[in-house]
Image (tube, grey):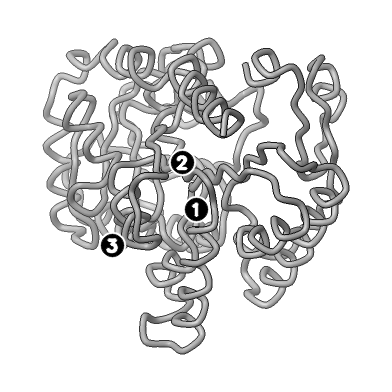
Amino acid sequence: MLARNFGSLSVICPKQDNENCFEALGQVKFYFVRNEKFSNRKLLLRIFGQLLKAIRFCLYLLRYANKGDVVISGTNPALFVLLMPILRKVTPFSWLLVVHDVFPENLIPAKILSKNNISYLLLKKYSDWAYGSANTIVVIGRDMAGLINEKIGSSSRIKLIQNWVRPSDIAVLPKEKALIIRDLSWQKQIVFQFFGNMGRVQGIENILSAIERVKHPKASFLFIGNGVMTPVIKSFIKNNPRLSVAYSESPPIEDRERGLAACDVAIVTLARGMFGLGVPSKAYFSLAADRPLLVVSDFGSEIGKVVEEDKVGWWCKPDDPSALSSMIDHICSLDLTTYRGRPRRALVEKYSDDIALEKYNRAVSELLCG
């Protein structure tokens, strides 16, 4: 839509395996940045990898961005955001920052730094200035809007554009269509699925502790994805062979809809303290797959509001495995067919690509008009 409305669009992104598909997008010009992968389990290597990627992005931007252009960037790599105000001193382009993760505040619930750590305090001071240098800041949640307002001391440049999914990209399939469900013989089980990134801030340990307490005999749990917490999940499954728990790696993107279909309820979790720091995009893919959500998050989080307002699932507080296990037992006692059609309808009506992209179109137009 942006390329169609504004005549041309250049995209700087990490090198992809399927580059030919990207190059076929007509008016969009792609510049692929070399992308070495470093272990997420080793913090220093991860920081070095982020810095290297950020520098490469900066070099490409210096080469191709011109005065008067609108540059849209995300918050990954986080160090790139910190360098953007410096780049704008060299080339005075307009900057639209799309916030998916708030740095360095997200380091606290990840237990990488503490609030009183001098490194955190220095990073936050510089980060607040860097974020505040953007002409427009797009946030993906109402809780995030409040946090960014505090961070930059202004609400006038903040725009809410929630996560979105193109409905046609995700077909609604019955659970039985998923091969893994047939392999596990879970056709008649009530399957709760965690799909996606298994990181430090996803509250994985809380889910595992809750699973140990669940009493309903038909409750089963499927973890699909990768991340630093994957070994913890695998170890839990190995040490608890009597529990109905299984793990599978992330499927290829062409099989994603079958992976999303492999459940009755999608579990979406964030650790305590993640209020305003992120909104799990996987929740919207599960809505597209017409699966109700079991959300575990701080009270008032964006995805918790989605569940409440659109009546597409249930909410539970974090770091309380007893409460979560009771909620799972309760869900198992319900007639889940009454939720059929509701999640997909909410996605189409409120969180589709047409709605979000039109908002981005307006935001870019405002910057171009000065």
Nearer the observer, 254 or 106: 106
Where is residue 49 drawn, in percent x and y? 74, 65
- In the picture of the structure, the residue carrying the numbered disc 3 is 272
Q: Quadrant of the N terminus?
A: top right
Task: Quote the CA–CA distance across marks 2 and 1.
Answer: 25 Å
Q: Are marks 2 and 3 in contact (CB under 8 Å)?
A: no
Task: Quote the CA–CA distance across marks 1 and 3.
Answer: 15 Å
Where is residue 195 drawn, in percent x and y? 47, 39
Q: Considering the numbered disc 2 on the image, is that residue within a helix, a strand or a loop?
A: strand
Residue 73 image-quadrant placement: top right
Nearer the observer, 275 or 318: 275
Q: Which label sits on residue 198?
A: 1
Where is residue 56 drawn, in percent x and y? 82, 57
Three-letter code for the amino acid on which mark 1 is drawn: Met
Q: Would residue 202 be found to the left or right of residue 22 on screen? A: left
Q: Quadrant of the C terminus?
A: top right
